[in-house]
Image (cartoon, rainbow, N blue to C red):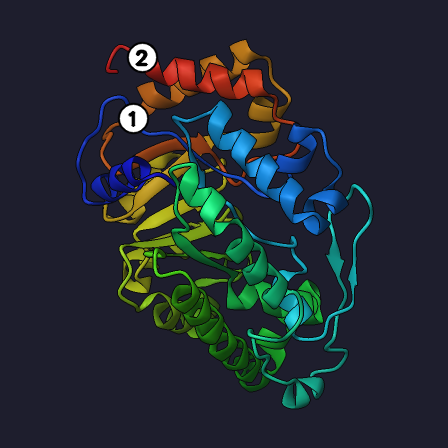
Amino acid sequence: MTDQHWDLLKRTINGEKLTPLPVGFIVDCPWLPNWYGAKILDYFTNDQLWLSVNLKAINEFPDVMFLPGFWSEYGMCTEPSAFGARCSFPANEFPHAYKVILTPDDIDTLPTPNPRTDGLLPFMLNRLKFAQPFIEQAGHKIRFAVARGPLNIASYLMGTSEFLTLLMMDPEKAERLIKKITAFLKDWLTLQRETFPSIDGIFLLDDIIGFVGETEFKTFGLPYFKELFGTDVSVRFLHNDALCTVSAPFLPEMGVNFFNMGFEISLNELKTLTGNKVTLLGNIPPRDVLASGTPGDVSKATTELINSLQDRSRIILSCGGGMPPGVKSENIAAFLQAVKSHPTA
């Protein structure tokens, strides 16, 4: 992100009303490589190609905040790999991490990874070190320490159904697993911040908090997210595009000041649930409109979204969730044009 984008983001978080409304998209491997014309595996394994793909995106759409910006990642294999998960990388499909916890008893012997040496994490940092001078030459900086959240990682380590069952059947063992993952995440986020002093934000992604009830969320989610977000950064960013009505009222308590949700809930409803204390990133349908729709469909949905807003403070326009596969440049351009040409712009 450029200094200008970072300033716009912080001003929006602080409640300043901006005209036109800012635009941002979460972008990573589901969209970037195929949009560029490359295979996903090439994107993961060729650092120069990875850099070229990200540079093309920021150069083609300089008015968009691409979040977190130059995201060094290996899909959902990123953090599970550090715990020893076997990972599959098809040539042009999303990678997959296999379970390492086959029975709840395996939790007791699960090692806490060292992010400096374990799994794919050193490769992530080294890629960013290589790219940093080129990123800064392009007028951008590395702004976020990024990780999947503790419940999300737990679901990959033992399976989603198995983990959700564990929450109910053996809460003490589930809590032991979440504590172990949280300790690892604190170390991993700290390492990223130490490696790149330009980082002033934390970005956590965790859809599993959308699959639990309020009691379970307050027990297994809230205290650990408070611990992870409880640090001195300007932007504390959470993504959860599963159901969020249970967790949304607790976002301010979690320390979250920037939130990306699914498209099934309106921004107006989320403003009520969060007491308008959290900046919202959304919220047109990502697959059915932004990816599969025509430019006219995108323009119409974007205009309707802006017109629906009862309060335009703390809003960054986007889709509900990350940028999905298959979004064409002309649809992003239609989104931007609809924002710029809106009567309030």
User: Which percent across, then down, holds residue 30?
Assistant: 65, 40
Say which residue label 1 marks. Answer: 21
At x 65%, y 53%, the residue is: 75
Q: Secondary structure at mark 1?
A: loop
Instruction: Give the distance between the C-alpha atoms of the residues marked 1 and 2, in whole angstroms.
Output: 10 Å
At x 45%, y 70%, the residue is: 191
Say above or below: 311 vs 239.
above
User: Which percent across, then down, holds residue 152?
Assistant: 57, 62
Quarter of image, res 317:
top left
Amino acid type at circle 2 is His
Name the side, left or right, on which 270 lies relative to 54. Answer: left
Say above or below: 341 vs 150.
above
How many numbered circles are shown? 2
* Quadrant the N terminus occupies: top left
At x 62%, y 79%, the residue is: 169
Name the side, left or right, on which 44 lies relative to 331. Answer: right
- Between disc 1 and disc 2, whose residue precedes? 1
Q: Residues within 10 Å of mark 1 (few under 14, many from 20)?
A: many
Quarter of image, res 137:
top left
Q: From where the camera sits, is residue 73 visible?
A: yes
Instruction: Look at the numbered discs 1 and 2 and tell me whether their residues touch, using CB distance below 8 Å.
Output: yes
Of the pair 309 and 281, the residue shown nearer to us: 281
Quarter of image, res 272:
top left
